[in-house]
Amino acid sequence: MRITRRTLFAGAGAGALALLLASCTPDEPEPKPVEPSKTPEPTVDPTPVGEIPEAAAMFRTAWAADPYAFGARSVTPAGVTSVERAALAAPLMDRVFFAGEATSTERPGTVAGAADEGRRAAAQLAELADDGERIAVVGAGIAGSAAAGLLAEGGFAVTVIEARDRIGGRLATEATDDWPVPPQHGAWLFAPDDQAAAKLALVGVGSVDVDGRAGIGADGEVDAPSTEQIAKALATAREASADTPLAEALGEELSDELRAALDGYSAFTGIDPETASSWYAPELPAEPHTALVSDVAPFVEDALGDVDVTLSTVVSNISYDEEGVSVRFASGESITVDRLIVTVPIGVLQTDAIGFEPPLPFEHRGAISALEMGHMEAVWLRYETPFWETTAGVWQLVGPIGDDAATEEPSAGEPEGDATEGEQPDGETSAPPVIRTWINLLPTTGEPILVGLVGGRDARGLAELADDELHELARASLAPFADPPADGA
Ligand SMILES: Cc1cc2nc3c(=O)[nH]c(=O)nc-3n(C[C@H](O)[C@H](O)[C@H](O)COP(=O)(O)OP(=O)(O)OC[C@H]3O[C@@H](n4cnc5c(N)ncnc54)[C@H](O)[C@@H]3O)c2cc1C
């Protein structure tokens, strides 16, 4: 059941959950979520890119600016280990518990890892709690929903507090009648043997297999490196005697082909090979990818069961001691519960959006600053008719392309040269973004839809672009895949 904040407080007053309500002064204005754009906006006289038509519709994600995520998934930079993730998972005074994809040591950054962690935290809490205790969960993503559902099954009075006006967190489907296949904001491509993919199918979320690869290099068609080849390279990197950035660890070993393959690595992982840990580098999902083609909500609803979710309620402060936990909202209201599970993304914990009293222990703060929030964005393009003939499901631009080829953009593992422009939010400069990875949904859905995937540095660059700039960038990156290749490709 979804309830509003008003209902939660009415319920608390009636003793439904026996939540104790205290009134506090609002401290900060509630941040407004940034809505992903649903263009097509009319573009300013688009530069014609060969034969690539303008898309009939465009949808783009906006995770970098999302105030309840600040990125796509946690990633492990070189020098950081799963020890930091375990440290983040440690409970505070047996009252405040942490869960989410970032606390997973087995499958960090994934839906399956987040769900497992939600259940782990719920079981840990249930071991300590007495019957009838009041439990709250912050965040109605899959971790919070799995935790709440399990606790409710165990007979606890549990409520979920969620900042957005919807459940699902980083699992969300765009509600629209304009698209025959609805665009997905977050996770939507899984390996066939992924636990989450199996569960998604069980609850009736539709999917298709995305199979086959097409590669284009500077001189035309090339063999796109397979996920098996990349897995082999990652295994080699893991054997390095010290943890170094992935690209550096592979620098000496890699064939040109595999080096180029790392260009597409961040689109699926969210981390740049130049900073990724070689010991904890995420695998690419095996193929064929299971791609979701319907609303993902039933998956999260199934995990939640009958638990109440209070939507549009931003948690701003958590005070805890050995007796219980007081949770304050940005509205100024607060509730008191016996125990709490926090599932907000690490991107949120890295800001001061949620204050902790007493402050988080040193180990937690160390883990939060050591882990990184990786970036992944997607651009969905729908065409009236296809301009391509390949039936390959994954398209990959391999190595330097077009203008990049002329300026010799450094490949993964090579130091960046002078061919840089544009300043990133962290002050670094980098080359303009390139959309190197495309998912072709035509062969399996019959719909002329292409989804461009970018990650790491390119995703941060993409987030800065206006809609018309992004559309032109997409057309330029698609030019080599036109049949015949578009002018200049
Ligand atoms: C573009 C993209 C592609 C991805 N691709 C894949 C993939 O292919 N395979 C895969 O397995 N995983 C993928 N992931 C990662 C996957 O989506 C996440 O690992 C998983 O959904 C995280 O679940 P969670 O419950 O830990 O966090 P979330 O889903 O982020 O849930 C946390 C909740 O906390 C809420 N919240 C935040 N701040 C507050 C606050 N102050 N007060 C109250 N509530 C708050 C948020 O709104 C959110 O609902 C992808 C993610 C993205 C963004």
Image: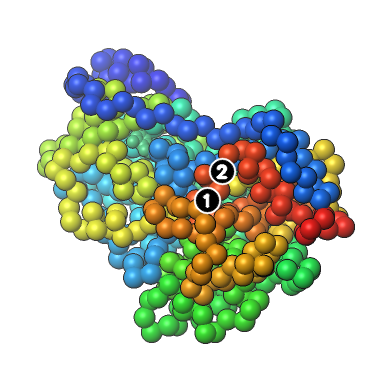
Residue at mark 2: C-beta within 8 A of ligand 1: no
Say left or right for 116 vs 8: right
- Circle 1 packing at 10 Å, graded few (<14), some (14-19), many (20+), is many
- In this view, the residue in front, 2 or 458, is 458
Q: CA distance from mark 1 to mark 2?
A: 7 Å
Judge whether residue 86 can be spotted in this image: no
Residue at 62% in and 81% down: 255
Report x, y in % for residue 184. Answer: 60, 41
Say left or right for 133 vs 70: left
The C terminus lies in quadrant:
bottom right
Report x, y in % for residue 432. Answer: 57, 55
Looking at the picture, does residue 138 appear above or below residue 9? below
Residue at 45% in and 39% down: 66
- Circle 2 packing at 10 Å, graded few (<14), some (14-19), many (20+), is few
The secondary element bearing badge 2 is classed as: loop
Report the residue marked by disc 1.
461
- In this view, the residue in front, 134 or 31, is 31
Report x, y in % for residue 399. Answer: 65, 69
Q: Dividing the picture into quarters, in which one does residue 293 lie?
A: top right
Q: Amino acid at mark 1?
A: Gly
Report the residue marked by disc 2.
465
Q: Dividing the picture into quarters, in which one does residue 231 lie?
A: bottom right
Q: How is the image coloured?
A: rainbow
Report x, y in % for residue 343. Answer: 35, 44
The secondary element bearing badge 1 is classed as: helix
- In this view, the residue in front, 83 or 143, is 83
Say left or right for 48 vs 323: right
Say left or right for 279 vs 362: right
Cβ atoms at labels 1 and 2 below 8 Å apart: yes
Looking at the picture, does residue 4 appear above or below residue 278? above
Badge count: 2
Q: Amino acid at mark 2?
A: Leu
